[in-house]
Image (spheres, helix red, strand yellow):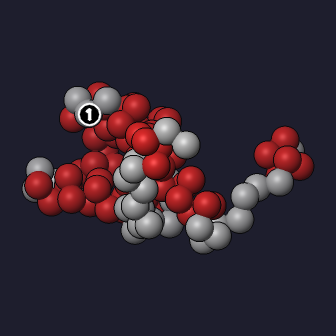
Amino acid sequence: MAAAERYAWRPDWAVHPGELLKDELVEREMTQTALAEATGFTQKHISMVVTGKAGIGIELALALERLWGTRGEVWMRLQADFDCHQVRHGLRPLASREEVVS
């Protein structure tokens, strides 16, 4: 095993990107309703993301990029890291191939 791999930082926790989105809203003094209107998403969807009940998909990531300038890839990477952590630590089951294909 290479030294870089052996000493790589691997946290045992992950933050849902919705928590970071919530922090951004507070920092920008913006409501979820205002974000919904600015991005074209429903208030319910924004609320579900902010509370961690839904993930940030590519459409919302790109809408946030257009609105705030934060690259969509940043939001997508946060979501991917969270999803991987959830599956890796048994907090969410990995979808079967049948579920993914259908």
Q: Nearer the viewer, residue 25 or 71?
A: 71
Residue at 11% across / 50% down in the picture? 28
Q: Is residue 19 left or right of residue 100?
A: left
Q: In which quadrant is the N terminus drawn?
A: top right
* Residue 51, picture quadrant: bottom left
* Residue 70, picture quadrant: top left
Residue at 41% across / 40% down in the picture? 4
- Visible residue check, residue 57: no
Please name the amino acid that badge 1 sits on. Answer: Thr
- Visible residue check, residue 12: yes
* Residue 92, picture quadrant: bottom right
Residue 68, percent across and down?
21, 35
Residue 58, percent across and down?
49, 36
Residue 29, percent across and down?
10, 56
Residue at 29% across / 54% down in the picture? 21
Above or below: residue 39 compared with residue 35: above
Q: Nearer the viewer, residue 41 or 49?
A: 49
Above or below: residue 75 compared with residue 42: above
Q: In which quadrant is the C terminus drawn?
A: top right
Q: Nearer the viewer, residue 28 or 16?
A: 16
User: How many marks on residues?
Assistant: 1
Q: Secondary structure at mark 1?
A: loop
Q: Residues within 10 Å of mark 1 (few under 14, many from 20)?
A: some
Residue bearing mark 1: 70
Furthest toward the bottom, the residue is: 91
Q: Is residue 69 left or right of residue 27?
A: right
Residue at 28% across / 40% down in the picture? 38
Q: Is residue 98 left or right of residue 25?
A: right
